[in-house]
Image: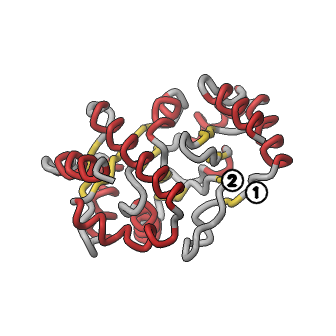
Amino acid sequence: MLETLEKLRIIESDYKPEKRVIDALEQKQIALVALTGPFGVGKSSCIREVVQNDDRFGRVKSFTTRERREGEWPHQYNFQPSSPKNLDKLLDQARHGHLLQYAVAPFNGHVYGSYLRDYNKPMMLLDALTAAIPRFKELPFKRHVNLALAAHPNDWQLTSRSRFQQLGPTELKGRIQEGISSLEWSLEHGDEMQWVQVEPGGVNNLANEVIGLAEGSQDPQPFSRVAGELLLNHLKTY
């Protein structure tokens, strides 16, 4: 299994879908709205709220080889087994360019990805790894909107408390490091990212802000980046 994951990582570094997939995506004229940020910051809640409030938006139902977490929305991902047989299937699909995109999470080896069929609305929302952003830019979406979600450390601690109880020490350490990497990448690539500060209990306001940024009718709030800087410093204390 480790050998298969290593092969997936090697292909991932310069993966491109086959021409049939690329041509079909270009014809769809879809805007991709990628949401990044640490676990527990509110990406999934935001995506659900946007999709419920505006039928122009859809959620990219990516597949993942990780197990479904306790209390997790069952339709959040297409959960696939992490068995050797399924990983071999994904490796074969990657070799032949059948996947639109995929990524192997650096700290736990879970595979995430999507197929062309998962993009079916004019604007598609994706909970994305920052490492995948450059590869998405190479795909012929009509428009790319990259949003970095962050919260004040005190607010993030409140919203992520239940996750801390669900995760074991090793996985928690990996998720914290994943969050650090996400925030660092977004801060280093300021020209490519728009920052959104998540306020406690304000999912409707958050959804409206994301809609405005996605359609280009709104500019980012000027101090949202500061929340990302503060949260990054907080995560580094764990």
Residue contact at pointers 1 and 2, CB within 8 angstroms: yes
Q: Residue at x 74, y 52 (%)?
A: 82
Task: Please name the amino acid that badge 2 sits on.
Answer: Thr
Task: Please name the amino acid that badge 1 sits on.
Answer: Pro
Q: Which residue is mark 1?
A: 81
Q: CA distance from mark 1 to mark 2?
A: 5 Å
Closest to the observer: 195 or 212?
195
Q: Residue at x 76, y 57 (%)?
A: 81
Please tell me which of labels 1 and 2 falls first in the chain: 2
Task: For mark 1, give the secondary structure.
Answer: loop
User: x, y (%) of residue 144?
Assistant: 42, 38
Q: Which residue is mark 2?
A: 65
**How packed is label 2: few (under 14 Cα within 10 Å), some, or many (20 or more)?**
many
User: x, y (%) of residue 50?
Assistant: 41, 65
Task: Judge left or right: residue 63 versus residue 224.
Answer: right
Q: Quadrant of the rendered structure where residue 229 is? A: top left
Q: Quadrant of the rendered structure where residue 121 is? A: bottom right
Q: How is the image coloured?
A: secondary structure
Q: Is residue 208 above or below residue 192?
A: below
Q: Residue at x 79, y 29 (%)?
A: 96
Task: Judge left or right: residue 116 versus residue 39.
Answer: right
